[in-house]
Amino acid sequence: MAKAQKGQTRVITGNAVGAYGAMLCRPEVVAAYPITPQSELAEQLAQFVSNGVLDAEYVEVEGENSAMNVALAASVAGARAFTATSSYGLVFMYDALQEASGFRTPVVMVNANRETPGIHAVSSGQQDMISARDTGWVQIIVENDQEILDQIIIAFRLAEDYNIQLPVMVNYDGFYLSYLAEAVEIPNIEDVDAFLAPLKKQPGRQKLVPGVSIGCGTHGMEMGYVEARYKHCQALERAKNKVDEIDKAFGDYFGRYYHGQIEEYRTDDADIIIVASGSATGTVRTVIDTKREAGIKVGLVKLRLFRPFPAERLIKALKGKKAIGVIDRSLCFGWKYGPICMELRALSPEIGPTPILSYIDGLANLDITVPHIGRVIDEVGAAAQGKPYQEVTWIPMEE
Amino acid sequence: MVEGTKKRNRVFDYFCIEDQFAGGVAWCAGCPLELTARFVPQVLGKNMIFVGTPGCAAPVLHGQNIGAWHKLAYLASVMTGVPSKATGLSRYYNRIGLDATVVCFTGDGCATDVGFQPLSGAAERREKIIYLAYDNEGYMNTGNQRSSATPLGAATTTTPVGKIGRGKVTISKNMPLVMLMHRPTYMATATLSHLEDFAKKLQKAKEKAKEGFVYLHVFSPCPVGWRINSNMTIEVCRTAVRTNYFPLWEAEEGKPRFTVEVANPKPITEFTKLMRKFSHLKEDGLAELQKAVDERYALIKSLCDANK
């Protein structure tokens, strides 16, 4: 495959980028309901349709639950479908999220991460995405505006792959990225067409059409249920390598690589590793560079794929390291570690007897600052030297 | 006799497409839902797709009992997503030029309670779908619990009659009127005792759904929950019409009119005596129910009269 033409560079917000990313993939049905901090994306897509830039059925639904239901049903009928939400919106479509994955619909959704119900918070945090962990979706976390756009394109290629056929959620930090204007290269739509074209060469997926004796959402009786669930889990397992594969193809064509399931930064010779995700990883890199100058061998593992959990690649990256610090921007109620840390600790037998320190930071728009990360690296470094350490630290509560 | 034969032929002219359901399906004996489900495709044709929910229709529509099933395409949904799923289907079918009649087929619980928001939304957006609510006045599949469609005074398992409880204490949600206020392209009430009326409405529904939203409210007595003999359900439908308990009317483009007018409506006791869900009601309770029926009828009549 040849290389893509140079795209147009524009300085736009993460939400606008999300709309561009979706538009470039030519979804046929778009359903969206506005919610802070995603609303601009819904507006921009509506404007694209109004201007004739995007030829799609745009359904201005009366709620997020309907947004997901419209998208998944259109997908069942054979459409390429897109939606976007955040926070309470994601919670409100919880039942439909499970149908979308259970029906094996390749819906792509953008979720602008925001705190979720309980305490009303119009602020960033990954709690929404974490709370949708067990809905059977593929969940990708991105770091910056360019990655939002590129991941939406990758998400469609992943979701619609004949061997995957799963819905994909692209998560970016609300407020931090949704309203952050950055220079972004917008690919030419013909090049996006070309990148998605391999999907057309695959066998067509099963579609629900009238006049044919076929149903969707059938009662899963006993083994029928088990078999469908088994296949769903197998597809999620396959998605891990597929993410790496598509990422490579994307990089070869567009010139931007994201390293698939996880990105490793200065990990090769590192003694200690910081695991982080989302917009905070940029700050982590900066602090790592500073600490490296002071002789501390620290590296970063940026978690890009949350579901399916990239166990194999994490084990490879973390095995033999002297200590690990995990920064979580959400909570795992009833379990003291942060959710990503908790998942990571499940790999302890494979990683080895390494101290794993859990840090809760960046809830409700509290910044994950340079001093915070400096402190994390210092503490993880001390743990690596065998000093006593605190298993879980709520950084904002101690500042 | 001659006239009778002629009438019979006309009815069967409407139901001219082969039955899409097998014999021996897993619905209760005497349930009008089965006949409704069978008749709808016989009028609308095979290019229809049912979007349904867990409910009385589900065991047959969604393949729980696959020993005796149907031949139609269907999409099963949880109760909160039916009209939205129908929207997704119909938008895409229309976009690609596929001839399809998308029919939401739910009970009153889904339509009036838990699934009301997306129904109202789809009606407001004038989605090109038919929403058929079979109204058995409660959650019958889960064991006769009350819904918003349960009438005043009715005994259900969640409005039980006891030392204090006297059945449901509020009147039912007037769902056909609620839907009229959305000004659908077409809407109608129907029931199986008036089969030709029902068939004509289904034909209109199919045509009008090409332009926009269609709502059909089908009265569907539940022999089990209402405690009716299984051979009496059609008679209950007929009596509901003749007492003005369930008036038959329709509205094209928001203009309501009666399709069946009852010259001398019978008292509500003619209806209530056919079932046991009202059997605890004394004279005052029955009078209250009569008042509710009269009020509701008067309101619809005034709307129909205003439109004459």
Image (cartoon, coloured by chain):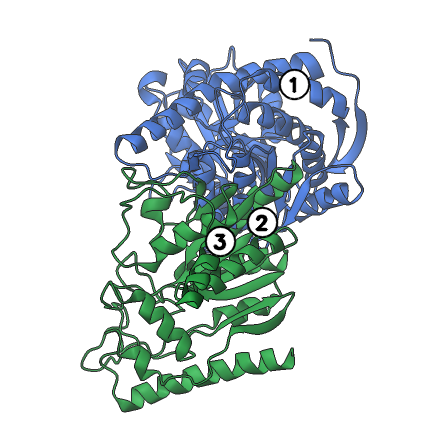
Chain colours: A blue, B green
Residue located at (65% from left, 65% from top) = B253
Q: In the image shown, does A137 or A255 lie closer to the viewer?
A: A137
Q: Which residue is mark 3?
A: B13
Residue type at the position of mark 2: Ser
Q: What is the CA distance from the residue labelled 2 to the residue labelled 3? A: 62 Å
Local crowd size for mark 3, using a 10 Å CA cut-off: few (<14), some (14–19), many (≥20): few
Q: Is there CB contact under 8 Å for labels 2 and 3?
A: no
Mark closer to the chain start, 2 or 1:
2
Residue B77 visible to an observer of this rendering: yes
- Give residue A103's position: percent from left, percent from top: 44, 35
Res A367 quadrant in image? top right
Q: Which of the chains bears the disc numbered 1? A: A
Q: The N terminus of chain A is located in which quarter?
A: top right
Res A302 quadrant in image? top right
* Image position of A123 (left or right of A138): right
Residue type at the position of mark 3: Asp
Q: Which of the chains bears the disc numbered 2? A: A
Res B90 quadrant in image? top right
Q: Which residue is mark 1?
A: A197
Q: In the image shown, does A283 or A61 lie closer to the viewer?
A: A61
Q: What is the CA distance from the residue labelled 2 to the residue labelled 1? A: 38 Å
Q: Which numbered mark, 3 or 1, is in the foreground of this view?
A: 3
Outermost residue toward the front in this view = B2
Q: Which residue is mark 2?
A: A123
Q: Is there CB contact under 8 Å for labels 2 and 1?
A: no
- Give residue B218's position: percent from left, percent from top: 44, 63
What element does badge 3 sit on? helix
